[in-house]
Image (spheres, helix red, strand yellow):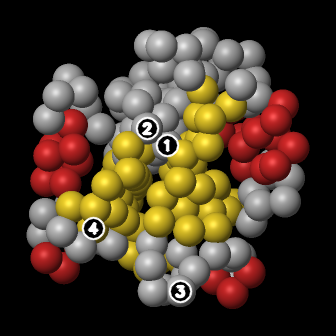
């Protein structure tokens, strides 16, 4: 897929945990997904089948997470940097306690030559969108829900000069 076919808004998900926490992607999400070119997934798909299902809708850039099975870890890196719409985007799941997670995630991309404009991460299941210097740290939350039951995904807006992460809650 050429970069030119990628819209300025990109779907971002993490912590889907299929089929452990949910049987499939939420129907409301799947309806929206059918119009997307690209999806970014920040880990904890759980099975290779869940990744392949997502790939049937769009081009997927993904990393593995701590809950992903062996088959999935064989095909996905733990960290990656991609370029979309001329923007450098880092993907990393995260690890450890939710406290200090953003610092650990930033440290994964600490070398100047690899520092992305956006770092997409997951692990905590809690939505997060905040600038740290010139880098946006963005966690879309979890499509399978967080500790308080909320389900969410993210939209990464790359149009124009500004980069913005938007969290969309599902009912």
Q: Nearer the viewer, residue 144 or 62?
A: 144
Q: Secondary structure at mark 2?
A: loop
Image: 125 above or below 33 = above
Residue occupying image coordinates x 53% and y 30%: 142
Residue found 60% across the figure and 12% down from its top:
20
Q: Between marks 4 and 3, how big is the CA–CA gap?
A: 16 Å
Question: In what element is the residue under mark 4?
Answer: strand
Categorize mark 1 by other alpha carbons within 10 Å: few (<14), some (14-19), many (20+). Answer: many
Q: Is residue 47 visible?
A: no
In what element is the residue under mark 3? loop
Q: Mark 4 touching mark 1, by CB under 8 A?
A: no
Q: Quadrant of the N terminus?
A: bottom right
Q: Which residue carries the number 3 mark?
A: 160
The residue that label 2 is drawn on is 127
Query: Which residue was labeled with disc 1?
Result: 140
Q: Nearer the viewer, mark 4 or mark 3?
A: 3
The residues bearing labels 3 and 1 have C-alpha atoms spaced at a distance of 21 Å
On the question of residue 28 being in view, the answer is yes
Q: CA distance from mark 2 to mark 3?
A: 24 Å
SS state under label 1: loop
Q: Is residue 35 above or below residue 123?
A: below
| Mark count | 4
Q: Residue 111 in the image: x percent, y percent?
A: 12, 69
* Residue 153 against residue 19 in the figure, above or below: below
């Amino acid at each position: 897929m050429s970069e030119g076919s990628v819209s300025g808004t990109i779907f971002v998900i993490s912590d889907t945990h299929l089929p452990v926490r949910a049987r499939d992607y939420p129907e409301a999400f799947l309806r929206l997904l059918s119009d997307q070119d690209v999806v970014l997934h920040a880990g904890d798909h759980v099975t290779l089948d869940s990744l392949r299902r997502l790939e049937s809708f769009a081009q997927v850039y993904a990393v593995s997470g701590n809950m992903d099975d062996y088959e999935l870890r064989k095909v996905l890196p733990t960290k990656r940097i991609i370029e979309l719409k001329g923007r450098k985007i880092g993907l990393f799941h995260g690890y450890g306690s939710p406290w200090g997670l953003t610092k650990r995630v930033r440290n994964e991309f600490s070398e100047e030559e690899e520092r992305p404009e956006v770092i997409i991460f997951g692990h905590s299941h809690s939505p997060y969108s905040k600038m740290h210097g010139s880098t946006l740290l963005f966690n879309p939350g979890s499509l399978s829900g967080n500790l308080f039951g909320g389900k969410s995904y993210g939209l990464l807006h790359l149009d124009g000069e500004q980069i913005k992460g938007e969290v969309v809650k599902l009912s």
